[in-house]
Amino acid sequence: MLEMSKEWEGGNYADVLRRRECDGTHRVGVEGKKRSSSKISPSGKFNIWQYLENVMTGKKVFGAGIGMTALLTLLTPLVAKSSIYLMVAIRVIEGIFEGVTYPCIHAIWARWAPVYERSRMSSIAYAGSYAGTVVSMPLSGVLAQQVSWESVFYVSGSIGCLWCISWLIIIKASPERDPYISPEEKAYIQNSIGDLTNQKIKHPWKSILTSSGVWAIVV
């Protein structure tokens, strides 16, 4: 109690609360890392779910979604000249792969964005998609008029493939896997978000599949 009263004597309550919150988060993160520092379960057996979590990261799923969309975009002019049905099928498949991008970006931010910076980082990420639309729409018109309508798909698909390769090489799934991050920044992120490797999420699939609101959006 005496130690607590000395902390509050300065009157800067926000700093005291922030300091106490960081200390508590740090202790939780350290304890969580001790419990889940291995792929071996407490019973001594190999934990397949932790292994799959390390293999199928949000980074890879996000990159695969963009990469497949870009690849199918490159094939669109060829398919469009051969069959209208294949053209429609490719566009539907592209939409399926694009559907993983927004959920995956949240999974990536969950491991990279400090708690008090997530809203800002998410806003920047979403703003990028709108900025891309603003740039690509007039550029597509210029390409279609000056070159050909096929060039719109070739240029945008090529940019997407180059972006995907750069993403998979440069971006890491978490601060722990990034060899170039500074120790100070790594410690700051880890202390802010704590340890996530031991968390298990149970998805309410029954509630989702029986929700009228979900089916209204799907249909």
Image (cartoon, grey):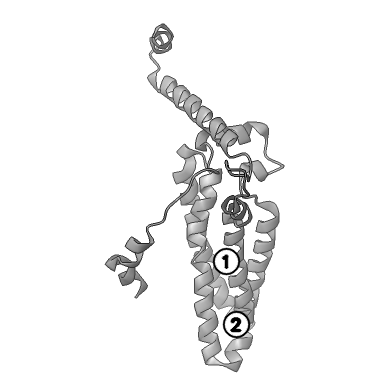
What secondary structure is found at the residue carrying circle 1? Answer: helix
Q: Which residue is mark 1?
A: 65
The residue type indicated by label 1 comes to Gly
Q: Is residue 180 left or right of residue 211?
A: right
Residue density around tag 1, few if under 14, some if 14–19, many if 20 or more, within 10 Å: many
Q: Residue at x 57, y 72 (%)?
A: 139
Q: Residue at x 35, y 63 (%)?
A: 206
Residue density around tag 2, few if under 14, some if 14–19, many if 20 or more, within 10 Å: many
Q: Nearer the viewer, residue 40 or 112?
A: 40
Relative height, residue 199 to residue 214 (above, below) = above
Q: Which residue is mark 2?
A: 76
N-term-proximal mark, 2 vs 1? 1
Q: In the rendering, at what x and y percent does residue 56 appear? A: 60, 57
Q: Residue furthest front?
A: 43
Q: Residue at x 57, y 53 (%)?
A: 49
Q: Residue furthest bottom?
A: 82
Quadrant for residue 162, please give it: bottom right
The residue type indicated by label 2 comes to Thr
Q: Residue at x 65, y 63 (%)?
A: 164
Quadrant for residue 10, please give it: top left
Q: In the rendering, at what x and y percent does residue 96 appear? A: 50, 72
Q: In the rendering, at what x and y percent does residue 208 appear? A: 35, 63
Give me the C-alpha separation between circle 2 and circle 1: 17 Å
Q: Is residue 142 left or right of residue 92?
A: right
Q: Nearer the viewer, mark 2 or mark 1?
A: 1
Relative height, residue 184 to residue 6 (above, below) = below
